[in-house]
Image: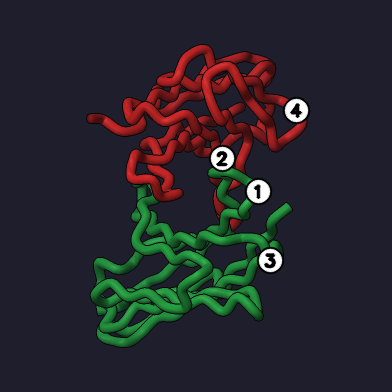
Chain colours: A red, B green
Amino acid sequence: NAGVTQTPKFHILKTGQSMTLQCAQDMNHGYMSWYRQDPGMGLRLIYYSAAAGTTDKEVPNGYNVSRLNTEDFPLRLVSAAPSQTSVYLCASPGTSGRNEQFFGPGTRLTVL
Amino acid sequence: GENVEQHPSTLSVQEGDSAVIKCTYSDSASNYFPWYKQELGKRPQLIIDIRSNVGEKKDQRIAVTLNKTAKHFSLHITETQPEDSAVYFCAAIGETSGSRLTFGEGTQLTVNP
């Protein structure tokens, strides 16, 4: 039981390039979410999905997601901008019935 | 939507002293309040949580208190140790927000030996 996994750990993009950050969970939970973490600003919710086939966004532009199955929740940066330089964390609740969120190890993304 | 404010942003204490971090929330319907600890270079991990039907919860050296009337909750760490040094985040979930957590900005706690 790996919990929540993310790839890659680090990546550097040039402005305007696109990229997909991968997230997978093996806890068979319907809910998954993406946060970005910036110094002094805590963790900000970007996108979430309550179940396979559904997604909802919290921020207006620059990101897309898909949820084709329960396990995977990839986050796509359509045309990367320097403002998207951040650490991206994927999360999903466990199976305890509580609201506890388990986080993946994160992807540190730099956009030049 | 929910708004969570966290204070202080940095906190430095001597080993053995107590540390207190405070958070306020805006949505009176919020009913779950977790605290996460994030060590340098690692992912956030849950250390303690409290539900709105409880006023206080303790787990060894850490405790959380909740004042629903004032809409604030606090993390208390007693007998601090150097390994308590980390960034601590509070968060809240509202009754209608499913599993969507709203986080505070974080507190960098440094415990000096």
x and y percentages locating residue A31 in the rendered image: 50, 33
Residue B113 showing in the rendered view: yes
Which mark is first along the chain, 3 or 1? 3
Q: Position of residue B71 (x, y in %)?
A: 64, 74
**Mark 3 vs mark 4: in front:** 3
Contact? badges 1 and 2 (CB < 8 Å): no
Residue under circle 3? B28
Q: Which residue is mark 4?
A: A61
Nearest the viewer among A30 and B84 is A30
Label 1, label 2: how far apart the Cα atoms are: 22 Å
Give the class, few, some or many, for how many residues have Cα within 10 Å of label 2's Cα (few <14, many ≥20). Answer: many
Quarter occupied by the C terminus of chain B: bottom left
Tell me whether marks 2 and 4 sit on the same chain.
yes
Question: Is disc 1 on the same chain as disc 4?
Answer: no
Alpha-carbon span between mark 3 and mark 2: 26 Å
Question: What residue did someone put label 1 on?
Answer: B96
Q: Are marks 3 and 2 in contact (CB under 8 Å)?
A: no
